[in-house]
Structure formats: structure tokens, C-alpha cells
Image: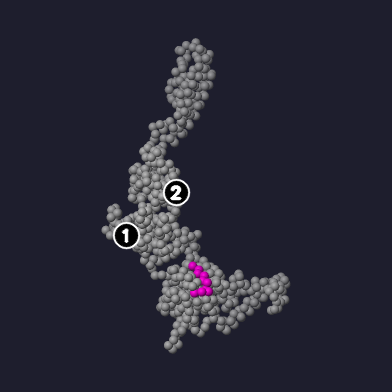
Amino acid sequence: MAPTLYHQCQGMIHLLNRYNWTEFTIVTTKISSNKDFVGCMEEMVKLRGVTHGYITKYRFTLSSVIEIDAVSEAKIDKALAVVKQNTVRVFLLHAQSDEAKNILDRAERMGLTSEIYMWILTSSSIGVIPIRASSSYPIGSLGFSNNRSAAVIEQAVRSAIKVWALGLEEISKNQDILARTNLVPNMTCNASFLNGFWKDGKVLYTYMKKSKFDDPPVSFSDNGIINHATLDIYNVQPLYDKSRMFRKWEPVGKLLPVKNSTGHFEMAIQMNEITWPGRSTFPPKGKPDRRLFRIATLSEPPYVIYINPDETTGKCGHHAIPCQVNATRFENLNASFNGDVCCTGLCIDLLTMLSQTMDFDFVMYEINDTKWGIKDETTGEWNGLIRELVDHKSDFVMTSLKINHQRSSAIDFSVPFMETGITIIVSIRKGAISPTAFLEPYDYPSWCLILVFSVHATGASIFIFEWLSPSGLDHGKTPLREHKFSLFRSFWLIWAMLFGASVSVDNPRGVSSRFLANVWALFALVFLASYTANLAAFMITIDDYYKLSGIQDWRLMNPTAVTPHFRFATVPGGSTEDNLKKNYPRMHKYMMKYNKSTVQEGISALKRQEIHAFIYDSTVLEYWAGRDPECDLKTVGKWYAMTGYGIGFPRGSKYIDEFNKVLLEFQNNGK
């Protein structure tokens, strides 16, 4: 009948909800019930989730679980150092009271008990409520404890007896069960565990769990835990005694069952005035103040795209943010001379989501050298975006920055938010109808067989049969006036039947020659039908393009083997060129004279046939191929050097874990 750890979890989630503390960290020790407490709070978080379709949004976030081995101050300090690195400011402490005091003492030394932090303690962390609270407990802390007053205990005994009586009453209503059940246990208080189990007591236990009444509200879950219980909420407040200040646990609220609008009981909290940490007049926010980040970027459609502000308002529109760029590079942008334009694209959408979720502001700017970042082999210096992070001029980089091993040795990357690789794009050459297209339904040997051999052989055979036939020419005895037929007239007949020409012909009279002529007519019918059906497929225009198999295609590996030489390019100073330089040095050396400064220049050169292929990031080239108005671009070959895009941070940045956690949440939620 007493409150359990589950009810304390209910009270804590109500406190978090009341004061809008949506993120929290559990700090616990090797206390026997630590797993139960963690599992209980995880269940509370899930119960507060809202599911829309296949996506569940959680109001609360369990940031981390810190299990401290409280045997030494060094181990406590090491664990609390991890806590301090996080941005979460609300801690739920579950430990033995002596362990809790040691942890809170070390937390105070590390500045984790100031007005920006909130500690909420379980009853085991407090122990028995004394007249004066230990100085280890920070002023403003909250804690839960059972009410152990005589009146509460007396009420619990009454409720327990009532539950027992209701269980017996329900058994008595079922005569079959009553006859099979021995309600008088054959055991004593001195019985051992092995022979002291009351089997029929399970029946009584089952019926007792079904007991339910409202005054006070009592009902049980399937595992026999009471659904509604009352807990006191205490607050550490200053206690002044003459000139000295002590601390006390002051009751400031309760967790108790109340009736809702439907007449059912549910758990709720009632709170009075609280002394907050640092004696503030307001509760802690539970999260850091809004931060300001400097973010470096480079344009790379569709991830980061520079556009003009709205002509009327002069502001950026929907899904666009202000960013500072080198205005001299963008003559086509009607932006102000200070380089303020608007940035939009996939990375900007992601940045906006991160800003809203993590509660930060930012200033986005384009770096001066507009390079992605490669390492100079001679000096060992980086350029571009990587140099910006190495010099700590930027808090992080947000654009289509590819993750690779060399860059990872100089900076830190977040988890990848998009997969990519290296691929090839080519231009489609519009086709024309070939002058010999009418011959393409059959190959040349077939045409020779039909037009040269079959026609003349059949014509000659018809004439021979007609010459030998008594009803025909009869070896030349029949006068030409009576039967005009000759070898050339036979050929004329064959050609006329083959093409279905409506011309005057002379027909043979002999049976054999007529039969052969009919066979030829049948062949001509099938031939014309087949030829006409296939001709339509060969009279259409066929677009042509270079069908490269991938980065190891023979035309890329040996471009001078074809005439004219195969020309291809990439953008220098980026990850793609660096990869080709290391893995295909001959290819890289050949293509240097064709390289273009931007992807857009490369695409334009490709469409003008200045180059035959352009090599770059797969997702970027897929975007350019998809938005080409003439549909003249096509990506070919297998993707090479698979990797991903990530957010770049300076080495050892304290923000990377925070960003990784949010990015993984976005991925799990399908964002």
C-alpha cells in the first residue's frame, strides 16, 4: 500500500512537465535499484510521447545516464566532469543518502549547484527527513519522500484490511473456487522458505488485485502495484537560527490522486512557494541561454544556394537566411555592396532545424578564398574551410563538406547527414535520322541475300519452269504473240510482287512456274509486313552519350587513345581532386588543363562540348542533371569513393556530441 519507486518517477515527470524542463540527466550510483529507476524514467518519457503515423515525438529527452562509483572523490569528479560538459541543467539523483551527500559536495565544488542547475532527489537520496538538512544538499533542491505520519500509516492499514476483505468476499461468491481453496494456511511464522509457501494464497492474491474503491482511491496494476499513492515533495530552504544559517527540508507540495473530468482518478502534483537554486525568484531554465555561433560556408547547390533578398522588403524569404558573401564574385546578384545575400538549400533547412531544436543563433559567412580545403604537401598547411576551422575562426562549417581521412586528421566531423560519392556527368548529343536508316531493319548480308540472290534466282527459276512447260513457252515453240513471257518479264514480275507495285505484268501459264510465283508472293507479303513494322523503330532520332562505366573507364585511364582526345575535368581544391590526385595521378595530371573553377562552369563547358565528361560529387551532379531545362545531362557509371557529408568542427570542439545526438534523433524520426 506504500508508494514505490514508480510513483516517484511519476512525480518527477510531473515536476519536469510543470516547469518545462524537457531535458534531463539521471545521476545514479551502484545502488541496487538503479536499473529500476532508469527503466522507470525511460517508460515515463515514452508515455508522454505523441505518435503521428509512423513518427513519435517525445516531449522529454533523457540526455544521458551517469552511473557513479562513489567510492572515491576522484571517480566522482571524473563522472561529474562528463555531466558538466553537457548542456542539460536538470539532474535526477538516485543513490543512498550518504552517496548522495558525497556527490552533491563534489558537484558544489565543480559549480554544478548554482542557480542555473536543478537537482531532484529520490527518497533514498534523502533518507529520513531530519529537523535540519545536511549542508551537502544545495538550497533549492527538490526531493520526494513518503509521508510516515501515524495518520497516514493508520489509513494504509485500514485500506489493506479492506482490500483483504474484498478479496475474500469475491472468493466466497464463487463456490467452485471456494471449494478448491484452503484459506487457512498450514504454516507458521517460523516456517522456512521452502516449506512455507502458501499455494492457495495465489488465488486470494489474484482477487485482492481486482479490489477497487474510491475513499481513499485504491486500485492495482497487473503486477500488484497500487496505482495511486501520495508522496510529499520537499524543498531545501535556508533556516536561520540567530546569526547562523542552516538548511531544512520544507514540504512544498504533494503528488496525489485527483479526479479528472471523466470522474476517474489520475496522479497530479500540487505545489506551494519554492526557494529556487541561488535563491532566484524564477525556476532554472533547464537549458543554456541561447548561444551565438559563427558558421562558415560555401555555395554548393542544392545544399547552399545564394539568392537575392526580396525586392520589396529587402529581407530573406521562407526557407532562406541572411549570409555574408564576397560580393565581387556574384555580379549577377543584385545584393548590397556589403555582400549580404540570402542562403537557401538543404543545409540551410538542416541548420534551421538544429537552431530551433538546440536553441542557438548564428551568423553565416562565406570564407575569402572560396576553397573547400586541401592540404599543401610542401608546407603542410590547409586552405579553405578546413583552414578556417584549424585557426578557430569559425565555430563550425555547414555546407556539403565531404568526410575523408585526411580532413578528419585536422578537424572533427559530426555523424554524416547525407551519403555521397564521386560520379561522372556527360552531355547528351541529340540524334538525327541516318541516311541509311531505311536499310537498318535488316543487316547488309540479309539485303544481299534478298535483293541479289533470291530475286534473281526466283525470277530465273520461274522463266525456266515456264520455258519447259508445254502450256507455257514449250521450249520456244509457242509464238510470242500468243504468250509474251521472257526472262526479263519474269524479273519484272518478281520485283513488282516484292514491292506490291500496281504495274502491268505478264503472268506465267505453267503449273510449276505459277506455284513458284505464288510462293514468292507469300514471301513478299511477309517480308513487307516485317520490314514496315521494324522500320518505325529505326526512323526515330537516337540520343547518344559517352557510356562511361565509372572512374576506371578506359577513356579516362587512357584519354589519348581516342581521336579526338577524351577531355574531362573537375573542380580544383576540393575532395574530388584530392582523391584523384592520390589514387589516379596520371589521370589527375592530364585533366589539370581542363579543370573548371566551379561546378556551374564545368556544366557549361560540358554542354558546349569543350569537355566530354565532368567528375564531381554524386549528389551535386544528380541535382544539376535533374534541373537542366534541356535535359541534356546524364550521370553515368558507378559511384566511387563512397562517403558522406558532415558538419565540420574545430579539433576537440565541445559541441560535437550535442550536434551528433540531435542529428541521430532527426534520422531516427525520419526528418
Q: Is residue 150 above or below residue 605?
A: below
User: Magenta span has 71?
Assistant: yes
Q: Which quarter shows the N terminus? A: bottom right
Say which residue label 1 marks.
Answer: 324
Q: Which label lies toward us, 2 or 1?
A: 2
Location of residue 389 (image quadrant): bottom left
Q: Crowding near pointer 2: few (<14 within 10 Å), some, many (20+)?
A: some
Q: Is residue 269 visible?
A: no
Residue at the extreme left of the image, as rendered: 337
Report x, y in % for residue 319.
37, 59
Asked if residue 102 is among those painted magenta in the image, a careful observer would answer: no
**As shown in the figure, which amino acid type bears the numbered disc 1?**
Gln
What is the magenta range? 64-73
For residue 363, side relative to residue 141 (left or right):
left
Camera-side residue: 594 or 658? 594
Seen in the image, is 433 located left or right of residue 24? left
Crowd tier of the residue under label 1, counting other residues whose Cα lies within 10 Å: few below 14, some 14–19, many 20 or above: some
Q: Position of residue 117 (x, y in %)?
A: 44, 74
Q: Residue at x 33, y 60 (%)?
A: 365
Task: Answer left or right for 109 relative to 604.
Answer: right
Label 2's element? strand
Q: Quadrant of the C terminus?
A: bottom left
**Which label sits on residue 639?**
2
Q: Between disc 2 and disc 1, whose residue precedes?
A: 1
